[in-house]
């Protein structure tokens, strides 16, 4: 799920200046990062 979300954000134009937001330890703190099961 993490890789799918990160790749989707990159393709949709995530700004290069905020690339650190996509690292695994930053991703775990993101409120919209919810497990879908």
Image (cartoon, rainbow, N blue to C red):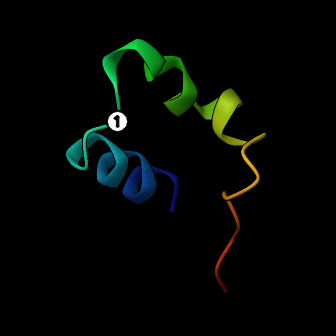
In the picture, measured across the screen, residue 29 lies left or right of residue 33, that is: right
Q: Residue furthest left?
A: 11
Instruction: Say left or right for 23 vs 13.
Output: right
Where does label 1 land, which residue?
14
On the image, the x and y values in percent for residue 13 come to 25, 40
Residue positioned 68% across, 29% down in the render:
26
For this rendering, which residue is in front, 30 or 28? 30
Q: Classify residue 32 as left or right of residue 21.
A: right
Q: Residues within 10 Å of mark 1 (few under 14, many from 20)?
A: some
Which residue is located at x 52 percent, y 18 percent? 20
Compared across the picture, whether 21 is left or right of 8 comes to: right
The C terminus: image quadrant: bottom right
Quarter-wise, where is residue 21 in the image? top right
Q: How many marks?
A: 1
Q: Could you tell me which residue is drawn at 51 percent across and 63 percent down?
A: 1
- Looking at the image, which residue sits at the far top? 17
The vertical placement of 2 against 34, above or below, is above
Task: Give the residue displayed 69% in from the left and 71% down from the top.
Answer: 35
- Give percent across and percent down for residue 8: 31, 54
User: Helix or strand or loop: what does disc 1 sit on?
Assistant: loop
Reply above or below: 27 against 1. Answer: above
- The correct choice, above or below, for 23 with respect to 10 in the image is above
Q: Is residue 3 above or below residue 10?
A: below
Picture coordinates of residue 30, whole percent (x, y): 72, 45
Nearer the observer, 21 or 15: 15
């Amino acid at each position: 799920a993490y890789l799918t979300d990160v790749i989707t954000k990159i393709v949709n134009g995530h700004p290069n200046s905020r690339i650190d937001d996509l690292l695994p330890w930053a991703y775990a703190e993101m409120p919209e990062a919810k497990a879908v099961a």
